[in-house]
Image (tube, helix red, strand yellow):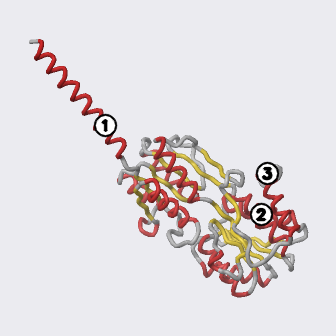
Amino acid sequence: MKKSIVIILLFISLLIITGCTEKESSSENHQIKVGIMLSDAGLGDQSFSDLGFAGLEKARDELNISFDYREIQETETYAKGLEELVQNDNDLIIGLGFSIQKDLETIAKKYPKKVFLLVDAQSDLPNVNNVTFKEEEASFLLGAIAGMKTTSNVVGFLGGEDVPLIQKFEKGFAAGVKSENPGAVVLSKYAGDFGNDKLGESIAKEMISANADFIYPAAGFTGVGAINESQRTGTYSFGVDSDQFYLAENSIVSSMLKQVDVAIFNTIQELVETGEIAEKNQALGIKDNGVSIAPIRVIELSPAEQNRLAKLQEEIASGSITILQ
């Protein structure tokens, strides 16, 4: 009798141990799945969407995640793409760009247990984490370069859509120009489109005809058109989001680097390592290495100008310079 009881107890213990081992093994072997809804210009924009995609590729290669993506050209609406990513059982669903916010919030409310990441806008929903950038800080540095080096005292800013996010680029750039050259004129125009390179060319022509010798486009593929026109006419330009020097190696002086790829990779890494995203709202600036500028090419800064630019960067990082009131 006692022998039978012992055998039963051993059998029960074995079942418990086996069950726990299987559970632990299943947990350890779970591969994080990430889905991303790309911004409106989609892959090949040589800017924002390509950066987001690069962050996912790095996470796949280094963190052993799998990922899926949707473009609005395929899904027609952001909501449909986001819904598909939810139905494909992704652990994290990323909405790339401020224009996605409304649809992402609709889907996030529908699936409150799903975890979402919104890049370039901020949602108050409890299951939506946010990453924004202080674009005005690096734009200020580009403006300072333009203010130092313009010979016509006229420079231009081209925005995609006239919305608060793009206005941050404009305000930062204009403030930087004025900090070094109070008498300079800053021409500003919004294209109302992030995907029309021909429109970008046309607007750049207008600015160059008005004597602008530096143009800073924050307009996605529309901005690429402006950069191409700047190179064609022998004037200077700046890239945006990524180092776009290779697009126009005789024109692009520097680029405003927005570390979207790094922010996405770091967020996924945190999710992989801890199982959660600790900080709901990340606002990344120069101090956080969230924004910066690419190496200065095409033109040369004097030692005094280089020192001045370095000082401006230090003052922005320390908070001594406040760009947006």
- Of the numbered discs 3 and 2, the one sitting upstream in the chain is 2
Amino acid on which the number 3 mark rests in the picture: Gln
Find numbered disc 1 in the image and state the secondary structure of the residue it sits on: helix
- Neighbours of disc 3 within 10 Å: few (<14), some (14-19), many (20+): few
- Neighbours of disc 2 within 10 Å: few (<14), some (14-19), many (20+): many
- Residue 174 appears at what percent x and percent y? 80, 65
Looking at the image, residue 311 sits to the left or right of residue 269; the answer is right
| Residue annotated with mark 1 | 23
Looking at the image, residue 137 sits to the left or right of residue 242; the answer is right
- Of the numbered discs 1 and 2, the one sitting upstream in the chain is 1
Q: CA distance from mark 1 to mark 2?
A: 53 Å
Q: CA distance from mark 3 to mark 1?
A: 53 Å
Looking at the image, residue 33 sits to the left or right of residue 125; the answer is left
| Residue annotated with mark 3 | 325
Residue 233 drawn above or below residue 70? below
- Residue 162 appears at what percent x and percent y? 67, 64
As drawn, the residue found furthest toward the front would be 3
Find numbered disc 2 in the image and state the secondary structure of the residue it sits on: helix
Amino acid on which the number 1 mark rests in the picture: Lys
Front residue (pair 120, 253): 253
- Of the numbered discs 3 and 1, the one sitting upstream in the chain is 1
Quarter of the image that includes the N terminus: top left
Question: Mark number for residue 141?
Answer: 2
Give the residue at x 57% y 72%: 46
Amino acid on which the number 2 mark rests in the picture: Leu
